[in-house]
Image: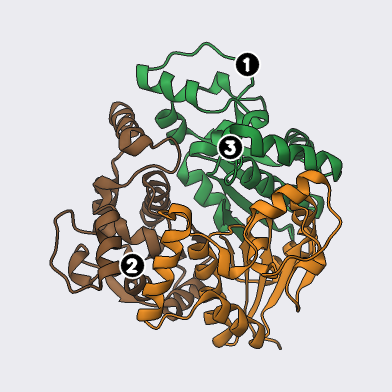
Chain colours: A brown, B orange, C green
């Protein structure tokens, strides 16, 4: 009998502080030997973008969205007191001083621990984000897949 | 034995993107034959307002809140890059181009699928929103009702 | 056999409206004889700050964060239409007119009902918030403790 527990987290937010909270919980659960699935949707997808510009076919508006949204984990702002990125920079400095793991490191750990990261295909269409713009190692799926995973989990969060 | 599964979603946010996520999950679950209850509270109530002005007895401050908050699903802004509604309009255009179902259609589908939509009466008092200002087909209840539903559900989200 | 049910709520947000929602749900569940654990992290910690300035050793940036963040439940803003605190004040007036319990009263009730309130130690490091700056009656722990509690609960929310 499989007694492994499972957790799912929808990462809707693209704010550094919220995404960090999501990965801290996900990595904590994986360290306790739980199965963990993270489902990235809307702004949360920005966490998974490659830092460099990737050529991709987009409509005019999708291109505009793409240029205005942060490219990857290093570029996310914080949800309060961001002041054009200064707040995020300050928070990163304090985190370093306090030996708190940075978001890129948290993502790396999540991959190494085998956390399943799914990019929501419907949101990718709305945001105009293409597979080739996102980091390696992701799965691509929609709400039915999320619901299937959530049905097997004992903790399901929307962040 | 009833083997139907149940989901509850608290819709606290009144942002178009978040409310859409809530309805996509709710409709997805209902399509998989789950029972679904959505509990609208605080800004989430704006989703359910009728688009036209409805005469209702309010205190001065409640009236002010009422005039400043969006009237219904068509008027919601997005949680980031809204720029006074321009972001929301852009997102709606992209959604149409991508054949993504609009929020009013999602709400219609939710009704047709028998999703239970509850308006939080305590929040209605705080926001000064009256029953007659909200769309048809809702139930009205408080936190005890929510908790009763959540106890029967296997997935409970706060959006 | 213990048939008590359990709920956990992560209070990530420091917005008056969201924190109120968290306490209304928590107190409602406790009134129905559930065990309830609230886990305060990031901006949510501001809810638990003492209103007076407390001397505490901090780095320069931690001190800046500390001065810019609200000190306690009375000082929280609302997540929309706050207008530098005016929105929060208006909402408090309406709540009083409607006999809705205020946040300080909700926190008092939570304590009296034996709700477990945990301050997230990792967030305290990042925000530079010290134990002595927070109200009495809290526990201090990290993500592993949260996950242990969530595993025992049938409703887990992230607010």
Asked if marks 2 and 3 fall on the same chain, the answer is no
- Compared with residue C146, is residue A94 higher up or lower down, i.e. above or below? above
Residue where numbered disc 1 is placed: C52
Q: Secondary structure at mark 2?
A: helix
Give the percent coordinates (x, y) of residue A88: 33, 37
Residue where numbered disc 3 is placed: C83
Q: Nearer the viewer, mark 3 or mark 1?
A: 3
Q: Is residue A9 visible?
A: no
What is the spatial separation of the Cα atoms under label 2 and label 3, in whole angstroms? 30 Å
What is the spatial separation of the Cα atoms under label 3 and label 1, in whole angstroms? 24 Å
Q: Secondary structure at mark 3?
A: helix
The quarter of the displayed image where residue B76 is located: bottom right
Q: Residue at x 24, y 46 (%)?
A: A74
Crowd around label 2: few <14 · some 14–19 · many ≥20 (10 Å): many
Residue where numbered disc 2 is placed: A127
What is the spatial separation of the Cα atoms under label 2 and label 1, in whole angstroms? 45 Å
Give the percent coordinates (x, y) of residue A92: 30, 34
Q: Nearer the viewer, residue C61 or B6?
A: C61
Q: Does the residue at mark 2 contact the one at mark 3 (Cβ under 8 Å)?
A: no
Mark 3 / mark 1, whichever is N-terminal: 1
Q: Disc 1: which chain?
A: C
Give the percent coordinates (x, y) of residue B116: 70, 77
Q: Does the residue at mark 2 contact the one at mark 1 (Cβ under 8 Å)?
A: no
Give the percent coordinates (x, y) of residue C51: 64, 21
């Amino acid at each position: 009998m499989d007694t492994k527990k499972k957790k799912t987290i929808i990462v809707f937010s693209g704010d550094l502080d919220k995404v960090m909270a999501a990965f801290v919980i996900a990595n904590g659960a994986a360290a306790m030997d739980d199965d963990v699935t993270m489902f990235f949707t809307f702004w949360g997808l920005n966490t998974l973008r490659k830092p460099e510009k990737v050529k991709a076919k987009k409509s005019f508006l999708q291109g505009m969205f793409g240029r205005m949204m942060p490219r990857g984990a290093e570029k996310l702002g914080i949800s309060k007191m961001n002041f054009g990125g200064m707040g995020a920079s300050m928070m990163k400095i304090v985190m370093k001083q306090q030996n708190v793991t940075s978001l890129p490191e948290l993502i790396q750990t999540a991959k190494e621990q085998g956390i399943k990261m799914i990019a929501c295909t419907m949101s990718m269409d709305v945001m105009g984000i293409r597979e080739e713009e996102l980091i390696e190692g992701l799965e691509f799926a929609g709400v039915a897949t999320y619901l299937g995973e959530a049905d097997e989990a004992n903790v399901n969060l929307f962040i």
